[in-house]
Image: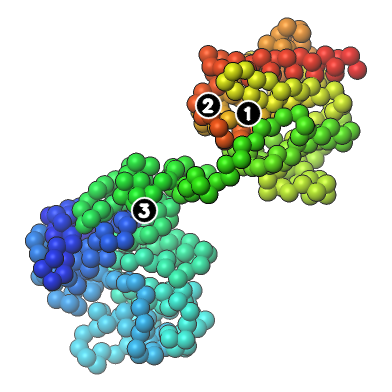
Amino acid sequence: MLNLEHVSGGYDGQTVIKDISFSVSPGEFFGILGPNGSGKTTLLKMVSGLIPCMSGSVQINNKNIRHFSRKALAKQMAVLPQLTAHAFSYTVRDTVALGRYAHHQGFFQTWTAEDEHVLQTVMEQTNITNFQDEAVQELSGGEQQRVFLAQALAQQPNLLLLDEPTNHLDLAYQKDLLDLLKKGARQEGLTVVSIFHDLNLASLYCDRLLLLHDGQKRALHTPDGVLTEGLIKEVYQTDVTKHPHPAVAKPQMHLLPDEDDISAEEVSIGPSMLHVKQEYISLAAPTSLRTLSSGVCGAGFGWNSAFVNRHVANNYDCSDPEGEMRCYLDKNGFDTSCTVGMMTAVQLADVAYGFWENDHVSLFTVVTAGVGNATDSTRSAGGRHPMTQGTINTWLFINGHVTEEAFIQAIITATEAKAQVLRELAITDENTGTIATGTSTDSVLVAATQQGQTLSYAGTATALGQLIGKSVYTETKKAIQRYQAR
């Protein structure tokens, strides 16, 4: 569809774009990234023919754009530039209708039924029909942006060029606009080439990304290949961290504030912060902790400062445990946006906990345990367990900076230690008669202060892993023995 071969160019004899080559396929959503002054807008103007190439060529369907008439080029390509002030006060309808110029023959071409159909369709797509009779100058910046997008779409181009199309748009309209463009690319074969400032939006919607640096191609690849911490730090001169989007297979970049902006006061989580009541056990941390949890609330990775292990009746049954738990937390004064919530039917007075440390690291381990629903995960056939008290809930609070790899290893190490206790105490699965590996409703939490020493690993060959294994083994054994004694 679009092909650039060794394109260079700029303004007043000054070269801004330097030897850029790439191709864009029909129906592709192609993004252009780069810091201010990297040449993004200059490159887009060269692709549109507004600025001539000093060298190289821009081709559409293997034909140099210099060989198109202006009207013929307008049938192939539409451009949505950055929003600027407009001197003429056209109505919205008249402004969008200008996009049909390329399809008219002669100066006095009659407005056709096809023109009207296209006009109404693009105004509906861009959600501007309700104010089509208003003057464009009276609209907000976001509304104007949608009007000029509708004008570009009214050209019915094969190629759409956009310069930061989400500028002036609020969050909902950003999504609506980009969803519309992505739908056009996928369903109608529209080729989209767009400049983005927002790296994360570009990642979510673009098939491929071109990263410019000082007018040169620094990278050209899929979002995962371009949005790397090293590349972005080099080109944008700022610290970022990369994480996968939680719902789609696209990367997201997150800015890292300077160390000076982060509280230097180091905290240590320990027994003084734990409160044991008949109804629930809670721990309030003085700062947000990085967490990985399987709790009813606060599951997955997150940042939390409150932790609740709640006692429920032995016959507790709820079709919406998360919703019911959130209501409970709210009622008891816990902020659900930063709280991990678990539940258990065991008596909370039997909780076992301890502060563990060695020369390298310290942690605080809390365990509540019942084994009435003990299960052998290697033999379980999905049979129903008797409604007796069960569930082993394990909390690990690590005083240190834990990597994501170490978070996962910590859960593995803690699970191995728990299983060893069940083996030594000969806890069996009533359905299979074999040694249990846990209960059917176990939960685990690993929380870290993310301050101080970096702890890269938590396997049993490491100091942290050994401390986790010993603490979970000891506290779990005490909790089960207290449960059995009751």
Give the Cα separation between the discs numbered 1 and 3: 39 Å
> Which one is nearer the viewer's eye here, 62 or 396?
396
Q: How is the image coloured?
A: rainbow
Q: In the drawing, does residue 358 fall left or right of residue 280?
A: left
Q: Quadrant of residue 463?
A: top right
Residues at circles 2 and 1 in contact by the CB criterion of under 8 Å: yes
Residue type at mark 3 is Cys
Residue 386 placement (x, y as % from top left): 83, 22
Q: In the drawing, does residue 352 fall left or right of residue 203?
A: right
Residue type at mark 1 is Ile
Q: Would you say residue 477 is visible in this rendering?
A: yes
Give the Cα separation between the discs numbered 2 and 3: 36 Å
Where 262 sits versus 422, above or below?
Answer: below
Where 140 sits versus 326, above or below?
Answer: below
Q: Which mark is residue 455?
A: 2
Mark 2: secondary structure = strand
Q: Would you say residue 118 is visible in this rendering?
A: no
Mark 1: secondary structure = strand
Q: Residue at x 81, y 24 (%)?
A: 351
Residue type at mark 2 is Leu
Q: In the drawing, does residue 469 fall left or right of residue 26?
A: right
